């Protein structure tokens, strides 16, 4: 153990923050009025947050602010003014998802620690090491990582590792979920998730059940393993929970982390009564130990909805006072003097003149009783030495005023040590002119495919200038030779052919690419990457390989665009959650725009097929139906052991073709997933006619959506 283990508690309001501190939290994470991933929590006003920073520091704890949403370009103008007061007040860290925000904070607020949110989907030591190299001090890796994977990050970096130990679990990798966004416009990337994963779904002939709803996480028995794996911060989920819940959970994890540190494994045991107390604090769907020991499993699911969502919790006493030492000197004819000590900090104050008693002198006992009345201040006297000459009289009012002045001065002295000097905003660089990528003279048409028959169709279409081939086609031995032949045919037709890399790049993916990447790089012209890990892997293998980032690599603002351009990418894919006006503001001249396709709305370590039909280790598709009988296609990608859940209706922007052209994207992309040969040809025919003539040909009879092109997300 290279450092103390931090108990990190959530707080959605000031009362909960005080409860967390009183229960033993070392640090608390909160959201402010903007940019936090819990938009429907009460959250802190700016004034409350400034006060909370001082409150936390008075008690020797830390406060972290969530700035962990994706930030739109027009919002960046407000980010500096939003953060500046908290930075100056002494905020201990910001938790971020957006790489643009990360880069902005690093440039504008030097010395403010940056924590990479779990929304960044850090799943590998590759990305962790890189984030460390650009100034991140702490990562919150994906909840899906095993203890072995976490240990690897800890061993290969000097990063602090913050992991969730208790609370709700998402079915999807955090940061990769668009389900709520596509169904109702409430984006998880904006802190507004409506949790449609908690609703029942039906697979095949099985009755509808909550197959996407996971039990809550509870790891209190696993504390020794978590600590020995290198986790340095134990994070409790629940910024929308009540103070009593936060106090109970925080207090119990505090108790058992301390027990392990004092007694080791031999003396570590969680009592049945404490386990029951922990579970009864909030009974939603039962508990599991998460992914630390397993990749997935049916036992993690909460298939039945309980009648009672939670039990009422008790509000405990949230007052917390720090022990201080004091020395009071009273001498006739001299000013009263009070010396206060808190840790290494000393404070001296002087009061009124003590008088020689004419009749009845004040007693030592009376003075001490009065001085110890610290009331609702942050302090309580531990040791108080009183030096008093005989025959001294001091009015009680003088003692009260001396105590008040002394405690206020000490409080100010403590919080002042955390203050930072007012910053001066560094002028923003010319982000637009910094673009190293040149717009093509003519907008192109590209296509992404996931099957051999789709690849055959797009290869034969003369208008498609680039094809993205799902790497699973190559990985499957039975299709590899056919893929090679079609790639050669496409190149002969003067098309570029890129391969699309894994959506999640954990150790399984790295092992696969270690075997095949050299051959893939020789066969294909470039790569489509879906995460930071993949891009870093490609760059390490051969820096000059052309790389395009997919829409899952978020670039919602000019800062994030510039960050990726400086990383050396060839092009990006326009965000699918921004509307046309926001895309215009962002500028997508160096981006491809998805104009057709079943968008992936979830990528999960859980497996719908395994949990409903059993695992046969063969990739494939199945259909999942919701309460409105809408069908979501689910792909189990066995090579990498994850599921991709696609939206129930495809995005199709054929009627918005003129608006699309006005945005001047680098290319329009057709994204094929489950389409058969006939439907692939129909879609290609429609968009080829638009591309060549600007006219709509026959439109397939099918349900479709315009996605967020008109509405966007809040």
Image (tube, rainbow, N blue to C red):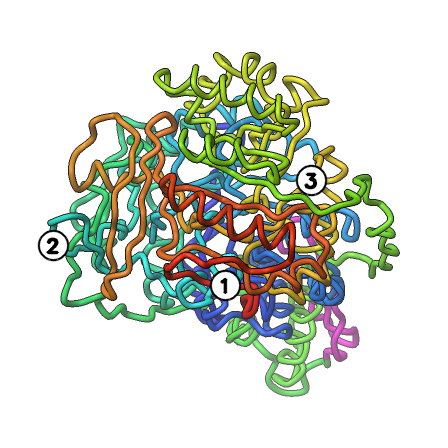
- Label placed on residue 571: 3
Mark 1 or mark 2: whose residue is earlier in sequence: 2
Relative side of 601 to 337, left or right: left
Type of secondary structure dominating the magenta stretch: strand
Residue at image coords 68%, 59%: 414
Label 1 to label 3: alpha-carbon separation: 24 Å
Disc 1 residue crowd, few under 14, some 14–19, many 20+, Cα 10 Å: some
Instruction: Tell me if residue 154 comes above or below residue 22 in the rendering.
Output: above
Question: Which stretch appears magenta?
Answer: 325-354
- Label placed on residue 706: 1
Name the residue nearer the viewer: 75 or 709: 709
Residue at image coords 43%, 53%: 24
Name the residue nearer the viewer: 512 or 255: 512
> Looking at the picture, how far across and down is residue 657, in whole percent?
61, 60
Residue at image coords 19%, 54%: 202
Mark 2 or mark 3: whose residue is earlier in sequence: 2
Is 472 covered by the magenta stretch? no
Provide the residue designation for mark 2.
207
Is 345 covered by the magenta stretch? yes
Relative side of 12 to 521, left or right: left
Disc 2 residue crowd, few under 14, some 14–19, many 20+, Cα 10 Å: few
* Screen quadrant of the C terminus: bottom right
């Amino acid at each position: 153990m290279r450092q103390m283990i931090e108990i990190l508690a959530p707080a959605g309001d000031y009362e909960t923050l005080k409860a967390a501190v009183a229960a033993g939290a070392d640090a608390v994470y909160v959201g402010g009025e903007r940019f936090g991933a819990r938009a429907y929590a009460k959250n802190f006003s700016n004034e409350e947050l400034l006060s909370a920073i001082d409150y936390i520091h008075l008690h020797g704890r830390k406060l972290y602010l969530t700035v962990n949403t994706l930030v739109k370009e027009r919002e960046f103008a407000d980010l500096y003014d939003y953060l500046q007061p908290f930075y100056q007040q002494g905020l201990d860290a910001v938790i971020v998802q957006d790489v643009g925000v990360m880069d902005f904070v690093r440039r504008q607020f030097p010395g403010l620690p940056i924590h990479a949110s779990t929304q960044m989907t850090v799943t590998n030591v590759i990305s962790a090491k890189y984030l460390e190299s650009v100034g991140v001090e702490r990562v919150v890796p994906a909840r899906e990582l095993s203890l072995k994977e976490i240990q690897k990050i800890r061993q290969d970096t000097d990063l602090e590792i913050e992991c969730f130990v208790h609370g709700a679990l998402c079915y999807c990798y955090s940061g990769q979920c668009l389900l709520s966004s596509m169904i109702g416009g409430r984006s998880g990337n904006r802190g507004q998730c409506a949790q449609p994963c908690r609703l029942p779904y039906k697979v095949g002939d099985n009755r509808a059940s909550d197959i996407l709803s996971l039990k809550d996480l509870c790891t209190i028995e696993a504390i020794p393993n978590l600590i020995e794996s290198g986790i340095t911060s134990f994070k409790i989920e629940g910024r929308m929970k009540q103070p009593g819940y936060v106090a109970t959970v925080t207090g119990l994890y505090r108790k058992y982390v301390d027990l392990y540190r004092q007694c080791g494994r031999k003396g570590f045991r969680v009592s049945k009564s404490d386990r029951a107390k922990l579970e009864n604090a909030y009974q939603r769907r039962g508990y599991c130990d998460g992914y630390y020991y397993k990749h997935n499993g049916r036992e993690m699911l909460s298939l039945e909805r309980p009648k009672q969502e939670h039990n009422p919790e008790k509000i405990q006493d949230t007052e917390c006072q720090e022990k201080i030492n004091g020395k009071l000197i009273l001498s006739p004819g001299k000013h009263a003097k009070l010396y206060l000590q808190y840790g290494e900090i000393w404070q001296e104050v002087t009061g009124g003149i003590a008088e020689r008693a004419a009749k009845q002198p004040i007693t030592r006992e009376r003075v001490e009783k009065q001085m110890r009345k610290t009331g609702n201040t942050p302090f309580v006297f531990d040791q108080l030495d009183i030096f008093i000459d005989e025959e001294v009289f001091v009015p009680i009012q003088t003692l009260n005023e001396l105590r008040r002045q002394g405690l206020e001065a000490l409080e100010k002295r403590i919080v002042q040590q955390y203050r930072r000097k007012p910053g001066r905003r560094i002028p923003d660089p010319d982000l637009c002119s910094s673009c190293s990528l040149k717009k093509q003279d003519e907008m192109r048409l590209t296509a992404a495919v996931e099957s051999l028959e789709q690849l055959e169709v797009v290869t034969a279409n003369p208008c498609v200038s680039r094809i993205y081939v799902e790497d699973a086609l190559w990985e499957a031995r039975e299709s590899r030779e056919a893929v090679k032949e079609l790639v050669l045919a496409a190149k002969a037709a003067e098309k570029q052919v890129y391969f699309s890399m894994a959506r999640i790049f954990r150790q399984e993916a790295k092992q696969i690419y270690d075997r095949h990447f050299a051959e893939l790089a020789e066969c294909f012209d470039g790569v489509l990457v879906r995460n930071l890990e993949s891009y870093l892997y490609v760059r390490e293998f051969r820096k000059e390989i052309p790389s395009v980032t997919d829409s899952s690599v978020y670039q919602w603002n000019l800062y994030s665009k510039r960050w990726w351009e400086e990383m050396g990418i060839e092009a990006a894919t326009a965000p699918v959650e921004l509307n046309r006006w926001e895309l215009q503001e962002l500028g997508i001249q160096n981006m491809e725009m998805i104009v057709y396709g079943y968008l992936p709305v979830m990528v999960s370590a859980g497996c719908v097929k395994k949990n409903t039909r059993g695992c046969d280790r063969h990739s494939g598709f199945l259909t999942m139906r919701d309460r409105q009988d809408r069908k979501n296609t689910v792909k189990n990608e066995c090579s990498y052991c994850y599921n991709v859940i696609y939206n129930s209706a495809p995005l199709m922007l054929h009627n918005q073709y003129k608006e699309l052209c006005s945005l001047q994207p680098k290319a329009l992309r057709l994204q094929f997933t489950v389409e058969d040969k006939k439907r692939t040809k129909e879609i290609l025919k429609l968009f080829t006619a638009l591309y060549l003539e600007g006219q709509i040909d026959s439109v397939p009879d099918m349900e479709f959506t315009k996605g967020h092109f008109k509405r966007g997300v809040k």
